[in-house]
Image (cartoon, rainbow, N blue to C red):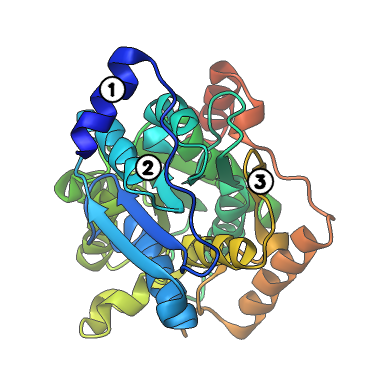
Amino acid sequence: MKNLVRVLALVLGTLVVSPALAADKPPRVFLLISGTLGDKGFNDSAKAGIDLIKAKYGDAVTVKFTELGTDAAKYSPALEDAGAEGYSIVICNNNFNNALSDVAPRYPDTLYVMYDGWISGNVPNVYSIQYKNSEAGYLAGVLAGTITQDKKDPRINAEPIVGFVGGRDLTGINDFLVGYVAGAQKALPTVKVVSNFVNSFTDTAKGKDQALVQYGTYKADVVYHAAGRAGLGVFDAAVESGKYAIGVDTDQAALYANDPAKAGLILTSTMKRIDLTLLGVVDKVKAGVKIGGQKVFLGIADGVIGYAPFNKAIPAATQKVLEGAVADVKAGKVKIPSAYDMTADQILKVRDSVNPAKN
């Protein structure tokens, strides 16, 4: 039946309206995951949001999730099916942008929630959530730029050089990077930042190889990654090199509780609390707040970006510096550049200006 509904909508051009949810029935929430779980970061954080929703509301909300892999041809049918089946809230990330712009208008009774990006155009039943990745990068940069000055630490080299490994050369990933550069320079204006892109969010081996080059050839003291599952290779490289790393999106040191050698080298992670964001969406819906059509930009001041617990390798004085960095951003005392406000040439200029191979 759901395939018939889809065909009628596409072939006849009719407006398909998902069944209105009866007032006495619990909201039905469906998370569509591009890729798979197990990335220890981005996707797992979204799934954690579903878990938080269930833990808070129990039977007052029904939840479901599915992993769709990386085949984009599956995204539009999945959105269609969720709408046709009458789900009240359907959640997806920005990989669904094009499909969502096409599908969502046919199911106006379904609230589609897209996180980590803004929907193209204005769609009344889509709530778009963008994160201030540059703020996360800034926090990582302040830490990296401070640690690289600690010459009492035997892991720190003579020259102040830090590294960054990104998944792909995309605006959202460059947003982490330009913030990272700004934070590192805030801590030490003369710091150098070597950066590479894996061109994948899943190739852990290549992520490790690129980090090994940064640690070895360029003598980076600490490497920050924004590379999804591929970034887990950075931690392997940190162990092999005896150097520090900074994780992303979730508390990645906590993932290695049974591997203290690795956990001990992850100074902290910058947190992008997708889980809290998705819980907040359901909170709003349950409270009767109309959020369809809105586009929000969330960061440190909203409580969804910050540091994970600090590693004991970070001196107490440095921890105070980091806490001060968070407070300054919250208070609006710091203006952090964003790749979303830059041209490709401007982003490249930032990268080249701190690249040790070019300076």
Indicate which disc residue 297 carries: 3
Q: Is residue 233 visible?
A: yes
- At numbered mark 1, what does the secondary structure look like: helix, strand or loop? helix
Q: Give the crowd class for mark 2: few <14, some 14-19, many >=20 residues within 10 Å.
A: many
Q: Residue at x 44, y 75 (%)?
A: 52
- The kind of residue tagged 1 is Leu
Tell me the mark number nearer the camera, choosing from 2 and 3.
Answer: 2
Q: Is residue 244 visible?
A: no
Q: CA distance from mark 2 to mark 3?
A: 26 Å
Quarter holding the N terminus? Answer: top left
Q: Residue at x 41, y 61 (%)?
A: 28
User: Is 318 in front, or is 256?
Assistant: 256
Q: Position of residue 9 (x, y in %)?
A: 33, 23
- The kind of residue tagged 3 is Phe
The answer to which quarter of the image holds residue 241 is bottom left
Q: Is residue 308 above or below residue 117?
A: below
Q: CA distance from mark 1 to mark 2?
A: 14 Å
Q: Residue at x 23, y 38 (%)?
A: 2
Q: CA distance from mark 1 to mark 3?
A: 36 Å
How many marks can you see?
A: 3
Reading the chain from its start, which is encountered first: label 1 or label 2?
A: 1
Do callouts 1 and 2 mark residues in contact (Cβ within 8 Å)?
no
Q: Position of residue 165 (x, y in %)?
A: 36, 45
Q: Is residue 227 above or below residue 248?
A: above
Q: Position of residue 152 (x, y in %)?
A: 51, 76
Tell me the mark number nearer the camera, choosing from 1 and 2.
Answer: 1
Tell me the mark number nearer the camera, choosing from 1 and 3.
Answer: 1
The outermost residue toward the top is: 12
- At numbered mark 2, what does the secondary structure look like: helix, strand or loop? helix
- At numbered mark 3, what does the secondary structure look like: helix, strand or loop? strand
Do callouts 1 and 3 mark residues in contact (Cβ within 8 Å)?
no
- What residue is shown with label 1? 8
